[in-house]
Image (cartoon, helix red, strand yellow):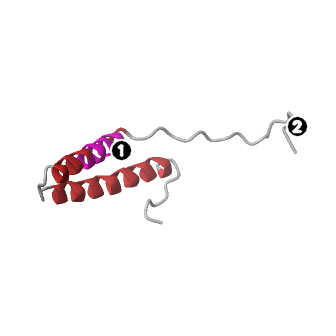
Amino acid sequence: MGDTGRRSSVPRKEPSPMPRIALYTLAVCVLAVAAAVVSFVQGSWLGIVWVLLAGLSSNMTWYYVKRGRAGGQGGSVTR
């Protein structure tokens, strides 16, 4: 029921920082979504390509984030 002031004897493992490639794919995803919105507002069907690119880069971002977290454990990313 609150903090007793005791410290755990087991050290907490800090999460590893996000890999740089995950940040790049996240930026591509955000830019692709913005480009899709602009394309659809202008009445162009080219926005479909931007939506597909956003989906691909989103999946790549999640993959690299999971890979970065599991990197020190030696486990598979696709569990």
Q: Amino acid at mark 2?
A: Thr
Side of 77 relative to 6 (left or right): left
x%, y% of residue 43? 13, 54
According to the image, label 1 marks what residue? 22
**Amino acid at pointer 1:** Ala
Expressed as whole percent of the image width and height from the top left, the position of residue 65 reads 42, 49
- Region in magenta: 22-33
Q: Assign the N terminus to one quadrant of the image.
A: top right
Dot 1 and dot 2 residues touching (CB under 8 Å): no
Q: Which numbered marker is on residue 76?
A: none
Instruction: Indicate yes or no whether the magenta region holds residue 54.
Output: no
Q: Which residue is mark 2?
A: 4
Measuring from the top left, give residue 13's x and y in whole percent: 62, 41
Quarter of the image where one finds residue 12: top right
Q: Residues within 10 Å of mark 2 (few under 14, many from 20)?
A: few
Image height of 34 relative to 6, above or below:
below
C-alpha distance separating marks 1 and 2 = 39 Å
Q: Is residue 71 left or right of residue 52?
A: right
Type of secondary structure dominating the magenta stretch:
helix
Q: Residue at coordinates 70% horizontally, 39% vertically from top-left?
A: 11
Disc 1 is placed on an element classified as: helix
Looking at this view, is 6 or 53 the one in front? 53
Q: Residue at x 17, y 55 (%)?
A: 47
Residue at the image point whose x is 19% and y is 46% from the top: 38
Is residue 39 rendered to the left or right of residue 8?
A: left
Tell me which residue sits at (49%, 52%) in the image.
Answer: 70
The answer to which of 72 and 26 lies nearer the viewer is 26
Q: Is residue 28 magenta?
A: yes
Sequence order check, earlier mark of 1 and 2: 2
| Of residues 38 and 66, the one drawn nearer to the viewer in this rendering | 38
Task: Provide the secondary structure element on which disc 2 rests.
Answer: loop
